[in-house]
Amino acid sequence: MKPLIGVTSDVDRNGGTLVHSRYIRAIRRAGGVPFVLPIGMDGIGEICSRLDGLLLIGGDDVDPFLYGEEPHQKLGKVIPGRDEMEIALVKGMIDQDKPVLGICRGHQLLNVAFGGTIYQDIYAQLSGNLLQHLQVTDLRFATHSVDIVPDSKLAQIAGTLEMRVNSLHHQAVKEVKSPLVVTAVAKDGVIEALESTAHRFVVGVQWHPEALVGGQELVTLKLFDRFIEAATD
Ligand code: MN
């Protein structure tokens, strides 16, 4: 049977459930069955026991209170209820060592769920010459490059230690707590990927692989394939 993959969601202007079709297509292409999880859904424990994998999609900022900070003036919109539900989903899945893939905000949320922290706005809080992480170019095209940590799961998937990714974020992972480790860094030092050393497949990427799938970008296709493979075990 094909694995059932929970897909988190955003809200549209009218409060309706919103998921970009690219996420759904990426899961289906890799052989998974996507199951969208609207914000505010209850029964998370039971849902996690049925799911074979969890995809944390992109979206707005994570509430800084969840990592012990007051809101910085450059903090973007926070959606009440979304973070709590997603953290409960992550905990429910990792307790059973089920695969979790976090994308962009999902990668940051994953870090917070493991006790880590976030830069609320890299341009206000990090010094030095930062790259353009809110790319103006269409998301289907990779812009900045990342260095991948050797011997990581990501390095294994990528088959290379340097690649170009797309980028659409003003926040970034700050402190990372064990068992999460950093697995990719941009040339300006911004953390671009994470994974757990204690779970079969818990991976976060700061970029948007689902937007690169259409371009048949090989690393991206392999990332989704490995995620779905892990959910099939
Ligand atoms: Mn970036």
Image (cartoon, rainbow, N blue to C red):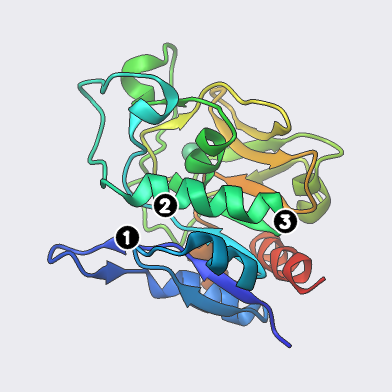
Residue 126: x, y in percent? 42, 15
Residue at 46% from the left image edge and 57% from the top image edge: 57
Report which quarter residue 62 is drawn in.
top left
- Quarter of the image with the N terminus is bottom right
Q: Amino acid at mark 2?
A: Met
Q: Which residue is mark 3?
A: 96
Q: How far is the residue under mark 3 from the one under mark 2?
A: 17 Å
Dot 1: element: loop
Q: Which residue is mark 1?
A: 40
Q: Which residue is mark 2?
A: 85
Q: Amino acid at mark 3?
A: Gln
Residue 65 horizontal side relative to residue 87, left or right: left
Residue at 28% from the left image edge and 19% from the top image edge: 70
Residue 53 horizontal side relative to residue 13, left or right: right
Dot 2: element: helix
Q: Amino acid at mark 1?
A: Gly
Dot 3: element: loop
- Which residue reaches farthest bottom? 1
Contact flag, marks 1 and 2 (Cβ < 8 Å) = yes
The vertical placement of 90 against 150, above or below, is below
